[in-house]
Amino acid sequence: MPRLRVALIGLGMAVGPHAKSLIDLKGKAEVVWAFSPTEARRVAFARNFPFRGTGDLDAVLADKSVDAVFVLTPPNAHLDIVKRAAQAGKHVLLEKPLEITTARARELVEACAKAGVRLGMVLQHRFRPASVRMKQVVAEGGLGKLAHVSVAVPWWRPQQGYYDQPGRGTLKRDGGGVLITQAIHTLDLLMHLAGPIVQVSALAATSHLHTMETEDQVVATLKFASGAMGSLDCTTVAYPGYPETIFLAGDKGSARLAGTEATIDFMGPPPKREIAGAVAGGGGGADPMAFPHDWHRDLIADFLDAIAEKRDPAVSGREALRVHNLVDALLRSARERRSIRPEV
């Protein structure tokens, strides 16, 4: 099959694993443009990657040879760029989150659907080998009917060098705090493994460790459509940052996913323990990019294959809307001090 022609839009912090993945996937895709409005970023990017830079977004979107764009800009720029790309007939791979509000996120998803282009989301934790194995075990009934499901994201982000950056942790640029910016990956994976959440009761706050507009810690109780109950604990105040965990307990066994490694215990008989994945950097500390690009590569490969095969990517825009609805429900519950049912 001919290689797809793609363009990178945004050359900030998120671009590294994408560029490395596209070099690995040169048999599937050719990068024809790398756009940033900032010359310094184009120059810095060119030192590390052999892709043609440009400061002209109009030229990128007008290039009829471009099949897909990777939108890696801050969240508040997503809607405008994605709508323009979709109208130009280009498929879109979008860095999380969809947008800064759920209303804007829905508008973005509908714009791609109306234009008939594929919309994929960069929620790469689903592609970690341990996550893939956990999903397989759950789908095959290896844990039985789930009774308990809990999630924790004990991450660290410093004030200096992270939250002091212009726009970081604001509603106007990021759309929220720990839930939509950091924990979104784990929340997506949580529902991917355990199914829909039908009730939440939450507390949210900004701690004294950070000076920021949005929340840096959220705790909640959860009820799942399956009947399972559990808890949520997400923060960016846990120095130096620890692996996020998802715990599933059913009537045939239990599983604990800690960052990039899963421990699965089957009741038997005979009882059996399985270890999936391996310990690796997960980006939970002061350096958000301290992780390998393998998971990005597998997600991008699936996105490129989805275009060629005319199917939805594994993580579609509509799938990502579920996470936005959950984040909205958690924060609304905290504000109104009552249980909330997330929108479907």
Image (cartoon, grey):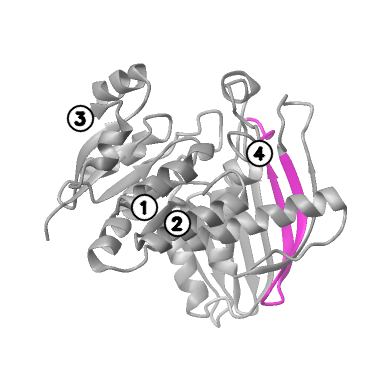
Labels 3, 2: front one: 2
Q: Residue type at mark 3?
A: Arg
For the C terminus, the quadrant is: bottom right
Image disc number at residue 202: none
Mark 4 vs mark 3, CA separation in Å: 34 Å
Residue at the right extreme of this rendering: 337
Q: Tell whether 21 sits left or right of 125.
A: left
Could you classify mark 3 by the number of other residues whose Cα lies within 10 Å: few (under 14), some (14-19), or many (20 or more)? some
Q: Which residues are magenta?
A: 217-239
Q: Is residue 203 magenta?
A: no
* Residue, disc 4: 177
Image disc number at residue 52: 3
Ranked by sequence position, the earlier of labels 3 and 2 is 3
Residue at the bottom extreme of this rendering: 269
Determine the secondary structure under disc 4. loop
Rendering coords of residue 69 (x, y %): 31, 45
Q: Residue type at mark 1?
A: Ala
Residue at the left extreme of this rendering: 2
For the N terminus, the quadrant is: bottom left
Label the magenta part by its dominant secondary structure. Answer: strand
Labels 4, 3: front one: 3
| Picture quadrant where residue 53 is located | top left
Mark 4 vs mark 1, CA separation in Å: 28 Å
* Residue, disc 1: 86
Ranked by sequence position, the earlier of labels 4 and 3 is 3
Q: Tell whether 317 sits left or right of 250.
A: left
Q: Residue type at mark 4?
A: Gly
Q: Residue type at mark 2?
A: Ala
Mark 3 vs mark 1, CA separation in Å: 22 Å
**Rendered view: 215 above or below 135:** above
